[in-house]
Amino acid sequence: MKQHRANEVVLITGCGSGIGKALALAFHQRGHRVCATARRLQSMEDLAARGIHTLSLDVTQESDVHRVLEDLCSRGESVGVLVNNAGYGAMGPLFDVPASEWQKQFDVNLFAPMALTRAVLPGMVQRRKGLIVNISSVSGVMTTPFAGAYCASKAALNAASDALRMELRPLGIRVVTVQPGGIQSAFGDRAADDVNLSPDSPYQAVREGVLSRANESQADAMPAARFAREVVASLDRPHPPALIRLGPKSTLLPVIKRVLPTGWLDRILITRFKLDLLK
């Protein structure tokens, strides 16, 4: 992925914290020109202090996307690498997840990455060079209770990435899917704060199991800085891998999903998240 044109930048979404912030720093430290974005500009003041160009961006707003690309164009820059990292997790039993939450989950985790990809593709196609990196999740491979909407959105992103990889490769553009395991971030805290669980839900009896799923990714989590360094090192290869799995359980869970009979896996997860207490 080594950039050869001085005016090409790495555009990264969701840089206000966690994985996105760590990726911005890792790319910057390896000599890449970075444009870091997040909804709140003040959340990236530390990045700006290091000389990284920062812009506010709500990935679900088309006008924001156009504004960011126009800013880069005015600076004589083009997007050589796009890292679709912005995302969030809607947690709770599907019985309690409203349609509006489903829409928001897919808006952020699927539709926004595809819209931003479409926006930068014309320039990449013209140059016959580019790299699209979609930060998905191992949760898109193995579904668990109380995270159905999140898992579904990441499974959809995995599928879209697979299609893009095949469609764009003949045009000189590579697509890499990153499926992290547990990475240290505020993801669990935000997910726990936003759990969908109505007062009269039959799942109130297993609220502890619902909250444990919200915080699951932070158990034995890998430091975000280490994750970012290893991911960027892989992306910097002349021929980066199509799939990167990194972090606790990122390689184990897909194997379990593939090897265990579905009924066995269901029973394990029902017990793990205390659903057996509803009997």
Image (tube, helix red, strand yellow):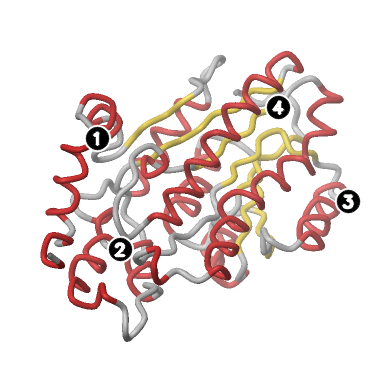
At a point 34% along the width and 45% down the height, the residue shown is 143
Badge number at residue 62:
none
**22 relative position to 218: left or right:** right
Number of other residues with Cα within 10 Å of mark 4, as a class: few under 14, some 14 to 19, many 20 or more: many
Q: Are marks 1 and 4 in contact (CB under 8 Å)?
A: no
User: In which quadrant is the N terminus drawn?
Assistant: top right
Q: Which residue is mark 3?
A: 74
Task: Give the x, y percent position of residue 84.
Answer: 59, 45
Q: Amino acid at mark 3?
A: Ser
Sequence-wise, the earlier of marks 2 and 3 is 3
Which residue is tagged 1?
262
N-terminal of the pair, mark 3 or mark 4, is 3
The image shows residue 146 at horizontal and vertical percentages of 32, 60
Q: Secondary structure at mark 1?
A: helix
Quadrant location of residue 108? bottom right
Amino acid beneath label 1? Thr
Q: Which one is earlier in the sequence, the residue at label 4 or at label 2?
A: 4
Q: Which residue is the site of mark 4?
A: 130
Task: Give the label, 2 or 1, closer to the camera.
Answer: 1
**SS at circle 2:** helix
Left or right: where 273 falls relative to 191? left
| Residue 249 found in image quarter | top left
* Dot 1 alpha-carbon crowd within 10 angstroms: few under 14, some 14 to 19, many 20 or more: few
Look at the numbered disc 4 and give the secondary structure of its residue.
strand
Observer-nearest residue: 237 or 159?
159
Mark 2: give few (<14), some (14-19) or many (20+) Cα within 10 Å: many
Please report whichever mark, 1 or 4, sits nearer to the chain's N-terminal start: 4
- Give the foreground label among 3 and 1: 1
Q: Determine the secondary structure under disc 3.
A: helix
Q: Which mark is residue 214?
A: 2
Q: As drawn, which residue projects farthest toward the front?
A: 279
- Find the residue positioned furthest to the bottom: 199
